[in-house]
Image: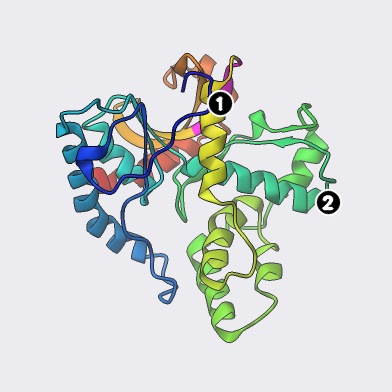
Amino acid sequence: MNGFLPNIEFVDSYDRVDGELLIMCAGKTIPKDTGKASDRTTLMHENKAIFEDCARSIKENPSHPPEMVIVVSNPNELSTWVFSKYFKRVVAIGPVLDSLRLQREIRDELHLPVETSVDGLVGGNHQLRGMAIYKSMLRINSEQPDSQLLERIFSPFKENPDVGEVYKKAYEMVQRGDEEVFNYINGYPILTRLSVKPLIEYYCGERADFPVGIAIITVIKAFQSNIRTVVTLTKKTCIGDNEICIGVPLFISKNGIEEIDLDSIENFRAYKDDEQLFRAVEMNCSWLL
């Protein structure tokens, strides 16, 4: 974290945790043979006890506590919430993965060559529903797309699709061995594709998704940089009267995290489109109660 290559050590007991940065990966994942996105709810209940045990045990460790925790474990919002009770600097990388996937979808949509840079941010919930695309932050070759190109990327749909129904049909296609499943998913708007495609890829292994390691490296490099970089990370924050863990835009650099005042409409207007993030907040509050 000081600009040099870090010394990375894998440990298998809480009393051996001694470092500036802790990357939390513990917890169960959704079995591939179920195909049910609703299993995330079951995962939530099973993993909460694991998260609590890990966070509490590491906090009680007499050795040097970590200065920062990067959470990989799912559900991302829940693991962030639990670790935030014990440590001050806690972020989760779910929105970084979602942002990388957004960039991939835009490349596919526009058939862009490799040398063309695409920068885009996704926040909100790291799950089937509630993602928010920050269209105003989208850059292609460092330039903001004009309205015509934005309409092409985010083409309007006759009706807002039910992502649950899209996912259900896509998984049924996988079970039947239907090779048209990704053509079916790609017929929907990018936000729907972002929600559905990673799960289908996970279950059927048709194409490689972005490894978690790439997201971790992306975040660590940003923290080592002299340049302030805006990224979206899941973080415990307040929006209005709601205290919530959700993917929000943050400035990060070697000086740490610089929070953006989300309650300041002048400051926040550049980072949201319509009220997607607030709708995502409403959908994400119930499991914290």
The residue depicted at 53 percent of the width and 28 percent of the height is 5
**Residue 274 seen:** no
Q: Is residue 147 left or right of residue 105?
A: right
Is 29 located above or below residue 148 in the figure?
Answer: below
> How many C-alpha atoms fall within 10 Å of the one at disc 2: few (<14), some, or many (≥20)?
few
Crowding near the residue tagged with mark 1, few <14, some 14–19, many ≥20 C-alpha atoms within 10 Å: many
SS assignment for the magenta stretch, majority: strand
Residue 111 disc label: 2
Question: Quarter of the image containing the C terminus?
Answer: top left
CA gap between label 2 and label 1 equals 28 Å
Residue 102 is left or right of residue 53, and the answer is right
Q: Is residue 44 visible?
A: yes
The tag earlier along the polypeptide, 2 or 1, is: 2
* Left or right: residue 183 compared with residue 39: right
Q: Which amino acid is tagged 1?
A: Ala
Give the SS element for disc 2: loop
- Position of residue 168 measured from the top left corner of the image (x, y, whole percent): 50, 72
Vertical relation: 253 (above or below) 140: above
Is 229 magenta? The answer is: yes
| Residue plotted at (27% across, 36% down) | 17
**Residue annotated with mark 1:** 222
Residue at 50% across, 17% down: 254
For residue 24, which quarter of the picture? top left
Extreme-bottom residue of the structure: 176
Magenta segment range?
227-232
Against 177, residue 59 (above or below) is above
Q: Position of residue 247 (x, y in %)?
A: 45, 36
Q: Is residue 123 magenta?
A: no
Residue sitting at x 56%, y 51%: 211
Q: Nearer the viewer, mark 2 or mark 1?
A: 1
User: Which quadrant of the structure image shows residue 186?
Assistant: bottom right
Q: Assess whether mark 1 and mark 2 are in contact (beta carbons under 8 angstroms).
A: no
